[in-house]
Each structure stands twice: as structure tokens, then as C-alpha cells.
Image (cartoon, grey):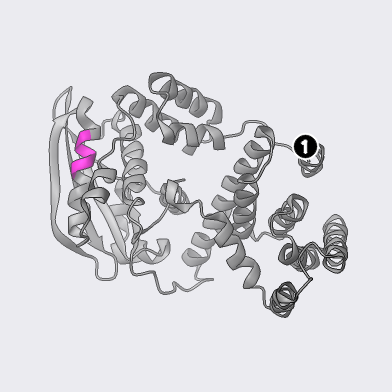
Amino acid sequence: MTANRHKGFLALLAIALACGSCAAQSRENRRLTKQPGVSASSGTEQAEWQRALDSGISHYKSGEYQQAVRSLIRAFHIKSSDQATLLFLGFSYEASRQHSKAAVIYRYLATLDVTAAVQSELLARMTENQEQGWRAGIRDKLTGKAAPGPNAGNSVAVLYFRNLSSWGELDPVIKGLAEILINDLARIQSLKLKERRQVQILIEELETTPTRLYDDFPMTEIGNILAANFLVTGGIERVSDTRISVSAGVVDARTGHLIGSGSRVTAQLSDVLASEKKLTLDIIRNLNLNLSQTQRRIVQIPPTQSNLAFIAFGKALHFADQGKTRDSQEQLRKALSLDPDFKLARLYIGRASTKRLSDSELESILHRSN
């Protein structure tokens, strides 16, 4: 997951306030907090919060998940940072298959004052629910259950580059390149980037390959499914044992037409990260974005100084996509041993939990830590 999409608190508020059944309660809470001598910590609101929390927990443990959500959102409006409220709200969203909302709740809770063990579990749950939400949304669009809606004007998806040489050693490089391109473009606040895993899930649901995705499906259809107006596409080719050629371009998914002239870089495989930076700047130019000198400098900061660490990172993504969690973590640890400052690798190893806790175990640990 890239760095600019961790605004958990604002997203959480948007979810809570979007609940129509809670709108009146929210207005009442705001009215109360404006009255002299009345605050969220007053005896009246404390009692109201406790009733809502107890009701939510009771409904959740009885399998009445929608009722639990309603009660827990009322509790959230009174104490938006209470860990028990957030935990059971996440549980209830997850149990009612509202995976995208559960992911936001777990993400926000993980930013609070929790132990490392709890945070690891929360981030693992966040990732799992986020992906289940993406998969459900993609399936609904593929089966016609959900019609494609309007996409944000600045929405961008980075597709895997074609492996034009059919050289298997390039597959991890391709995944690593996609992740780093997304991370670089995500530094530009005017862009809304799709996650790499959304593209991976689309490929899995279509039972296809990155190359066949280009050949078998129109760019307009891919853009609609991923809710992206712009698609970054490209190819990577082995020129010799040590040299590669990488090309990239931007497609307007609303028309299927290429924007601008595209870009091509031929370089040593050991210089792949420097090549990625040139491609990134050319992609930004094709998107008709003007960067300040500060923005340009930030975009050009390499994620790692070690090409070997980058290769290990790409292999970790490749293994993770195959469900080989232990192999993935081994490669992430290798990447970090080669470059301890490789933040993307550290982010991924923090999210990949090999041991999962039950709801009751997580509740117990969180309760003991408070």
C-alpha cells in the first residue's frame, strides 16, 4: 500500500457520517458539545456511549451485525478514538462483509496507541479486508451486478508492463517496477492512484496474464473495471544478459487512445531504478502535470540505493501474489538486510502477518494493553 493513502481518520469520519440512521445523532452530539458546560466526557454522554458500546458488542456476539454497526457508530460519534468501539466496529463490518469499511476501521485503529502485536494483527486484517472489498467490487463489475460509475478525473492505474522477452527473471522486476511507479506517482497529491493489488486481482479474476490482459481486453473496459481514467502501460524487454529496454506510455481509458509520445529507456539491469525515474517524469509530462522543483525533487528520490534490494522486493511481491507468505517475508528481510532504509520493504513486512489471532484473542490483548 503506498504512502499517501493512510489518511485513516478522515476516511473513517466520512464512513460514519455517511450513515443516514446516525445523521440525526451526529447533529445532536455536535449541538451538545457546543453547549456551555457540556462535553463528550460529561456524565450524560459517557453513559450514552457505554450503552451504545454495550449494545453493539451484544449485537455482534449474537450475530446481529447490522444492528451492531448502528450501535457502534453511535458510540463512535461520542468517542471517536475509543479502541473497544473501533475494534468491534471493525469486527462487525468484517462479519457483515462490508470489507472496505472494515479495512478503514482497522487502519485507523492501528495508528492509535496499541502494542506492536496488536498493530501487526490490525494491519493484516486491514490488508485482507481491503483486498476482499476490491475483489468483490471487481467481480460485481465483471458479472454486471454493479454498473461502472463515474471515475475521478485524476484516477490512475499502473498496469504491469508486458514481458516482451518471455524471460521469467523479469516477472519480479515488472511487479517491483509497478509498485515503485505507483509509489512515485502517489507523491503527487492531485493524482488518485489505484493499488497494484487491484490490478493483480483483476488478472486473477479474469484468469489471464499481464500480457493477455493487453491483448484480450480493451483499455476502456479495464479502466471501467478499475475505476481509472488513465492507465500507465508499457513493456520490458531483455536486450542482452545485462541490458534491458523499458517503454511506457499513458492511455486515456475513456477513449482508449495513447496520450503524448510515450517513453523508452535502454539501460543496464543494474540501473533499472534510475530508468524508472526517467519513465516516471515522462509519465507525469504525458499526464500534463506541472511539478514544482520541490515536487520534482521528491519524485526523483529513489526508494532504495540497492538494486539487489529492489530485486528482492520484486520477488517478495511475486511470492505474495502466489500466496507464498513465508517466501515473501524471506525476500523482504533480504531486501532490508541489503538496505535497512528501504521503507517500502519495511511497510510490506509490517503488514504481512503469518500468525492470525481470533477476534476474542485480539480483544483480550487490546484490553490488557489499555
Residue 268, horizontal then vertical, whole percent: 16, 27
Q: Is residue 352 above or below residue 132?
A: above
Task: Bin the neighbour count of mark 1 within 10 Å (Cα to Cα): few under 14, some 14-19, many 20 and up.
Answer: few
Q: Residue furthest front?
A: 36
Magenta-drawn stretch contains 292: no
Instruction: Look at label 1 and name its amino acid.
Output: Ser
Which corner quadrant holds the C terminus?
top right
Write down the quadrant of residue 85 in the picture: bottom right
- Quadrant in which residue 156 is drawn: bottom left
Q: Position of residue 109 (x, y in %)?
A: 65, 49
Q: Which residue is mark 1?
A: 369
Secondary structure beneath disc 1?
helix
Magenta region, main secondary structure: helix
Q: Looking at the image, which residue is at 35% across and 37% down?
A: 176
Numbered range of the magenta stretch:
274-278
Depth check, front residue: 11 or 293:
293
Q: Is residue 142 shown left or right of residue 184? A: right
Q: Residue at x 35, y 33 (%)?
A: 172
Q: In this rendering, is residue 78 above or below 7?
A: below
- Vertical arrangement, residue 202 with respect to residue 31, above or below: above
233 horizontally vs 28: left or right:
left
